[in-house]
Every structure is written in C-alpha cells, then in structure tokens.
Amino acid sequence: MATTRRFDVRDTALAPEGLGRIEWADRQMPVLAAIRERFETEQPLQGYRVSACLHVTSETANLMRTLQAGGADLVLCASNPLSTQDDVAAALVEEYGISVFAIKGEDNDTYYQHIEAAVDHKPQLTMDDGADVIGVLHSARREQLGDVIAGTEETTTGVIRLKALERDGALGFPVIAVNEAKTKHLFDNRYGTGQSTIDGIIRATNLLLAGHTIVIAGYGWCGRGVALRAKGMGAHVVVTEVDPLRALEAVMDGYQVLPMAGAAEIGDVFVTATGDKSVITREHMERMKDGAILANTGHFNVEIEIPALRSLAVETRTVRPLLEEFRLEDGRSLFLIADGRLVNLAAAEGHPAHVMDMSFANQALCAEYAVENAAKLEPKVYDVPREIDDEIARLKLETMGVEIDRLTEEQAKYLASWDEGT
Ligand SMILES: NC(=O)c1ccc[n+]([C@@H]2O[C@H](COP(=O)([O-])OP(=O)(O)OC[C@H]3O[C@@H](n4cnc5c(N)ncnc54)[C@H](O)[C@@H]3O)[C@@H](O)[C@H]2O)c1
C-alpha cells in the first residue's frame, strides 16, 4: 500500500524488517490497539494535520498507526539524531504510507531540516518529545502559530521548556503535558528508563554490573528506576542530587548519597538523569578513576560536559560501536557511550512496548481530547485529564488480567464524609 509521499529515511528496502518489529511491539500494546480499533470507527482526527516529533521506534510506529486510523494526516520526524530505528522508519513509509523524516546518525543540520519538514506540513496538532517542533513554531515560523489547535508533550524536559514559555506569556497554543499523567511518568520514566538504560549500558560495554559502583545523577522518576534496576543487578549505587527531599528519599531507599565531586572518585559507571546541564564537569572528570564509563539518559546531551572531555583528551578512538575512549594526558582513559545521547535509545531500543502502551495511549487520547475541546482550551500547559489517566490504568489492568476490588457504596460514603469517624 505504498503511496508517493515526501520522506527521508535511510533505505526503504529495510521495510520488511521494520514491519516485523512493529507487529511484535503491537502484541505488547493492547491498550493502544483497543484505542486504534475505536478510532477506526469513530474517526476523531479525520482530516487533521498532525506533525509528530518523536523517537522513531517500533512503539511510536504503533502510535502513528493509531492516529492514522483515527483519520489524521500525519508527518513524523525524529526527536533525537541517534534514536531512529531505520527499518521502522522504512516500514512506516512503505507499509503505512506515512511521511517520515528520520535517519539514525543524521547530523545536526539534517536533524533540524527534518523538523522543518514536519513544520512544513502546517500542523493543526503537534506531538513533541522535547518541544522541538513547538520551538520552531515559536521562533522561525511564528506565522503558523494561528493554525495550531493544540500540542502534546511527551517528556519532562519538554514540559520544563513549555512551562518557561507559558511563564513568559509567549505560549501560542494550548499544550497537554502527557509526561505529567500518572500512567506515563510512574511507569515509562521509572520502569521503562530504568530497564532500558541498564540495557543500553550493557549492550555498549558488556560490563558486569555486580560489584561495580554506579553513580546516578538525579533521583527523579528516571533516576529512581535506573537505581532500582542497578541495585537488583548487584551494583553499589551512589546517588547525587540537588533537591534535599529527593536526596533524603534516596538515603531512605538504601543508597549512598554524595556530591558529584565525591562520587566522581569512586564511580565505575556514571549515568546522568537530571534534565539539567553540566552535571558532570571537567573538575569531576579530572577526579575519575581510569576506565570510568559515562552515559546520559536525560533528554539532551548537555548533562555531561562533552566539549570538556574532548579538550582533556590527548587521543580518542572508538573501541566498540557507540563506545568512545578518551585517553587523558596522565594515562587514564574515560569512556563515553553514544556521544552522551539518551543511552537507552541510542545504544538499546528505548522503552519496552509494554510501558509505551500507556504513554502512547495518553498521546492518542489527548489528541482526541484536544480536538474535542479546542474551543475551551487556552494557550496554557494543561495536565492530562484525570479521566484519561484512570481509563488507561483500568484498561491496562484489564489487558493484564488483573482484577481489583471496587468501593462499596457504604465505603464511598464513609471516605467522602468528615463526620463518619468511628
Ligand atoms: N531516557 C529516556 O527514555 C527518558 C524517558 C523519560 C524522561 N527522560 C528525560 O530524563 C530527564 C529526567 O526526567 P525525570 O522524569 O526523571 O525528571 P525529574 O524531574 O523527576 O527528576 C530529575 C531530578 O534531577 C535532579 N537534578 C537536577 N539537577 C541536578 C544536578 N545538577 N545534580 C543532581 N541532580 C539534579 C532534580 O532535583 C530531580 O530530582 C529529563 O531530561 C527527561 O526528559 C528520558
């Protein structure tokens, strides 16, 4: 069913492999599949132009199929130069006739040209992971702001950027912060990032975590997940934080908490998960042990000061795919995974489909909600409506065959009253 569409992917001949992976992921995304089936009948997005800027993975492909089933006219570009699965991009073009602009390993210029291509689609709905499409619409393409009904945002860093835009009174249309749904960050950021970050580090290095010291910067949703899984694999986990509450939580969860300057001296593996910049600096690198491995799982590759690492090095070489050695003047070597890009997506396959099922169910239902409620929404950052969150949790439990108790009428009354104490 290939149609002649605009696209830029590595090689359309990769489509059969991509199709296999998309279908495999689909088996673990039953909530999204149920929404797709309803969308096919109800066509809630009929004729709407949607520009999506997401990691181009097999799970995203199933979201694209769902939006397409709902009638959307779609363009997809990558939200990171290293996270694209080229075979999946090919299958979306060849098998589903969707315009895709994404090539794994594309340079910065191509990355931004691809975002421009998505903006050229004149979106009425935007779907971002890191707010790059919204960023272009609010800078170089302000004349298009009026066309956009609403946007959705997938990740913590994107939500932070959009809230800054909102605070400045500069947000041009309503955006729903999908990341803030409980059925997103409690599962995707924690269990998804937790497992897949460890997966990426192991694929890139084949390191045995047991007995090694892993330093995790940031004890937010992602950091907690990485710490939990690293601990389970026998690593000694050290956490660094700037927020006293989160640091206290890490202490009570049984981890050693140190400032980065102290952690730098004892870590074998470092993972940044903060959404902040310059978390690992030149001073920290100067204190690290020979052989220390550096990885980032936060959205942008600014958490580790990579220019500092490059300037410290007297020699660099790639020792394994996506693992670069930096030999320093004093003879020590530090190793950086995937140029400091999201390690779980660059060196592994991103979050497993089982959690992306919920994240992308949120995306699909929020797109429908935005269209239905366009007249009521103002240019603000909105949380995902509680009913959508609850419905996704209910559907997920149902598809997992898990039953739960229901409140009796008497219990509901008791919980709602202030005077029915004893
Ligand atoms: N790899 C992935 O697939 C994936 C998935 C979801 C989110 N993310 C990204 O990961 C990052 C973290 O997301 P989150 O949901 O865990 O955010 P979060 O806000 O829950 O946690 C971030 C934590 O980092 C801490 N922090 C900030 N600056 C710090 C510093 N200099 N040193 C130590 N700690 C610091 C904050 O206090 C906070 O506790 C974001 O960039 C987000 O977009 C990545």
Image (cartoon, rainbow, N blue to C red):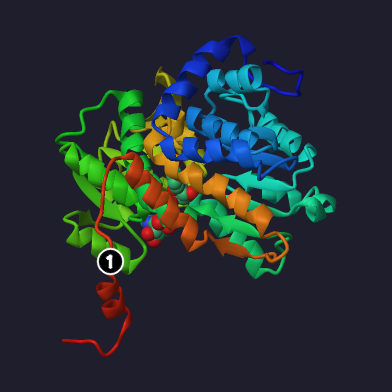
Kindly identify the amino acid type of the residue bearing the numbered disc 1: Leu
| Residue 51, position as x, y percentages in the image | 69, 40
Horizontal side of 125 relative to 232 (left or right) equals right
Check disc 1: other Cα within 10 Å, few if <14, some if 14-19, many if 20+.
Answer: few
Query: Which residue ends up furthest to the front in the rendered image?
Result: 409
Q: Quadrant of residue 202?
A: top left
In front of the other: 328 or 50 = 50
Q: Residue at x 33, y 80 (%)?
A: 416
Is any atom of residue 193 visible in this view?
yes
Quadrant in which the C terminus appears: bottom left
Query: Which residue ends up furthest to the top in the rendered image?
Result: 13
Q: Residue at x 55, y 46 (%)?
A: 363
In front of the other: 78 or 148 = 148
Query: Which residue ends up furthest to the bottom in the rendered image?
Result: 419
Image: 69 above or below 146: above
Q: Residue at x 31, y 37 (%)?
A: 195
Quadrant in which the N terminus appears: top right
Disc 1 target residue: 407
| Residue 279, position as x, y percentages in the image | 42, 51
Image: 164 above or below 233: below
Horizontal side of 110 relative to 243 (left or right) equals right
| Residue 45, position as x, y percentages in the image | 68, 43
In front of the other: 134 or 266 = 134
In front of the other: 46 or 313 = 46
Q: Quadrant of residue 389?
A: bottom left
